Image (cartoon, grey):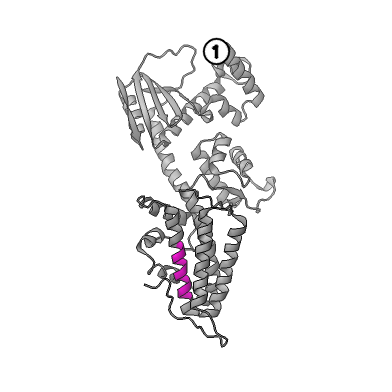
Amino acid sequence: MNLQGDFEGLTLASILQLLGNDQKTGVLTVTCDKEESRVFFQQGTIIYASASLKEARLGFLMRNDGIISVQQLQKCLALAKEEKLHLGKILVDKGYISLDTLKKYNTKQVEAILYHLLFWKKGRFVYKDAKLNLKGMIVTQLNPMKLILEASRRIDELSVLKQFIPSDKMVFKMSGKMQSKEEIKLNANEWRILSLIDGTRTVRQIISESGYDEFAVFKIFFSVISSGLIEQKEEIQLDDEKGENGYSAILTVFNDILTSIKKNITSELGDRSYSLFEESKAHIAIEFKQVLKDYHPDNHKNSNLQAIANALEQMDFIEDQNELLISGFTEYCAHVLKNIGEILGAQPLIHILEGIEKVLGYVKKYQAGSKEKSKIVNDMKNVIMQIHSEFEMDKKGKSKGGIFRLFSK
């Protein structure tokens, strides 16, 4: 039997299940972009798998777990290539590992490849019946259905973890709350990930450099974030990038602006400040309402980012979503300031505008130049000028301004 075609989502799991149920013997080749993996079936059981990714290679897994050294791995790789033998046989023959260890890591490698495959959202597959030459191979015995169930569990758990870490382009740093090593109880895998968190590497880079799979790294990140050992690096790069990373940079700036506003009105308005931010959405343009529907400065940044990303995903007809997001936040901020001015008067408002100017000053001074940065700074400065004009105070301390004409409907 020969099968081939494209797959999306859980379709690949269905293919594995079909080959298992039909007790097939042959090779399934799966490709996605530049990655390729091969899964070998013997009477419906998965006995081996190979992948182009180094993270799934036997020697890489052993090295990262401290089973063999870098020098031992390099030496055995050279011998395996020269003598055209399997790396595992060389490692056993040299006495670096036992046969039981080889079997254990052979199974671990196959599982890692298959879990990685089942996380692919789309790709192409080709299956061909074939007689397998198993002479000299150390094979494993894996039930496709058990792998599929475990992969589904991981996918579900990962979706929860990604609510706290919504993008693998995020950068984390040590929080400064870390105590001595004696007071911190982490396992070897957690220490390995922690050693790579330096305020410059993204989550994706750490996944790649650690050699651990995505699911394992996200779980460790969640653990060390929850314990307070690390925190997201607040420095942002406004570099015109589209997608969640671009949204995150824009959100960070406007969140700082709105947090600054909230800080200055809480003592005056108390709980009323929460509803003020919600009420200010009433008069913004409908497309901005859709994007900011679930946004609130009191929410966790990651929750806000996820809500905005989800909303923009439904608006794929918008050519420049970053520009839409900036315009939406700008108009929203303008209405927030208008409502504050009408409730508290001009004097508190002037103090709030000074706080916003400090945030914009930081963005202008420290963030890399881009059209996104220029638009945020320029648009918000225009809002500040208009608010000053509309609520300007005369010498007697009374507002000369009246209606907020710029954004009135």
What x and y, as percent, mark residue 5? 32, 28
Name the residue type under label 1. Lys
Q: Nearer the viewer, residue 25 or 292?
A: 292
What x and y, as percent, mark residue 251? 49, 57
Q: Is residue 150 left or right of residue 350?
A: left
Q: Nearer the viewer, residue 153 or 13?
A: 13
Residue 144 found in image quarter = top left
* Image vertical order of residue 11 relative to residue 203, above or below: above
Q: Residue at x 45, y 81 (%)?
A: 402
User: How busy is the neighbourhood of tag 1: few (under 14 within 10 Å), some, or many (20 plus)?
Assistant: few
Is any part of residue 255 visible from this angle? no
Which residue, given by chain and number where applicable, does mark 1 sit on? Answer: 84
* Image vertical order of residue 282 relative to residue 244, above or below: below
Q: Residue at x 51, y 83 (%)?
A: 399
Q: Residue at x 41, y 60 (%)?
A: 292
User: From which residue to which does the magenta span run?
Assistant: 329-340
Tag 1 secondary structure: loop
Residue 101 found in image quarter = top right
What x and y, as percent, mark residue 138? 49, 18
Q: Nearer the viewer, residue 230 or 30?
A: 30
Q: Is residue 311 left or right of residue 179?
A: left
Magenta residue check for 339:
yes
Quarter holding the N terminus? top left
* Image vertical order of residue 91 relative to residue 34, above or below: above
Magenta residue check for 242:
no
Q: Residue at x 44, y 66 (%)?
A: 332
